[in-house]
Amino acid sequence: MSTAELVPARRGALRRRTGLLVLAAVLAGTDLAIKTWAEQALPGAPIEGGPLDLQLAFNPGVAFSFASDAPAWVVVTLTGLITAAVAVALWRTVATSPRLWGIALAAILGGAAANLADRARDGVVTDYLHTGWWPTFNLADAFIVLGGITCVALSFLGSGHEEAQRSADQH
């Protein structure tokens, strides 16, 4: 790749990275706004919606209340490190990865950042989606799970990332 081709390619990569970080921020902001609403509207007044109810709950642990007895600073620190690792993975891989890979990482990052910001406030994560047969969760959790499933599926399906990376390395 010549120098003249390199500058537009770098701009394109930067634009793609920036767009995905904005997507992650929008997803995080959406979840945080709903958490704020849930904390005001749902205490003692759950809303029945059939298969999915709105019911306020607080989780001091991580997924499925794992480590709920750990000190809050430990959970915040570990989730902060994991969130930072996802941000680095997004930044490093999206320039040569399929678009869906970047969107999946942005979903994971947005969900992780929302839960981290929520937990940093008071040591717990606000949950508000309740099924009755599954632990109460929030939209950020759904972003993380759907992003993770997408990444696993793309990995198993051969997303083309390896071919793109080889092509980039050869030039």
Image (cartoon, grey):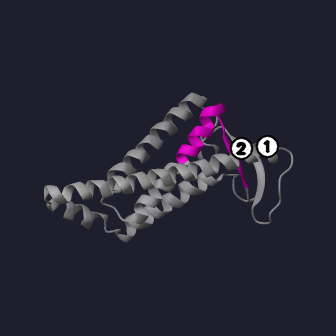
Left or right: where does residue 144 sit relative to residue 47?
Answer: left
Residue at 67% across, 47% down: 33
Residue behind mark 1 = 40
Residue behind mark 2 = 36
Q: Which corner quadrant holds the C terminus?
A: bottom left
Q: Main secondary structure of the magenta part?
A: helix
Q: Within the magenta stretch, is there residue 125?
A: yes
> For residue 111, which numbered disc appears in the image?
none
Q: Within the magenta stretch, is there residue 37?
A: no
Q: Nearer the viewer, residue 153 or 68?
A: 153
Left or right: where does residue 125 sit relative to residue 83?
Answer: right
| Position in image of residue 128 (x %, y %) | 72, 50
Residue at 30% across, 60% down: 96
Q: Nearer the viewer, residue 21 or 54?
A: 21
Q: Could you say which quadrant of the image residue 52 lies in?
A: bottom right
Identified by mark 1, the residue type is: Gln
| Position in image of residue 160 (x %, y %) | 31, 68
Left or right: where does residue 114 sit relative to residue 20?
Answer: right
Residue 67 visible: no
Asked if labels 2 and 1 touch by Cβ distance under 8 angstroms, the answer is: yes
Q: In the image, is residue 156 above or below residue 43?
A: below
Determine crowd level at label 2: few under 14, some 14-19, many 20+ residues with C-alpha closer than 10 A: few
Q: What segment carries the magenta color?
A: 112-129
Residue at 49% across, 58% down: 148
Kind of element beneath mark 2: helix
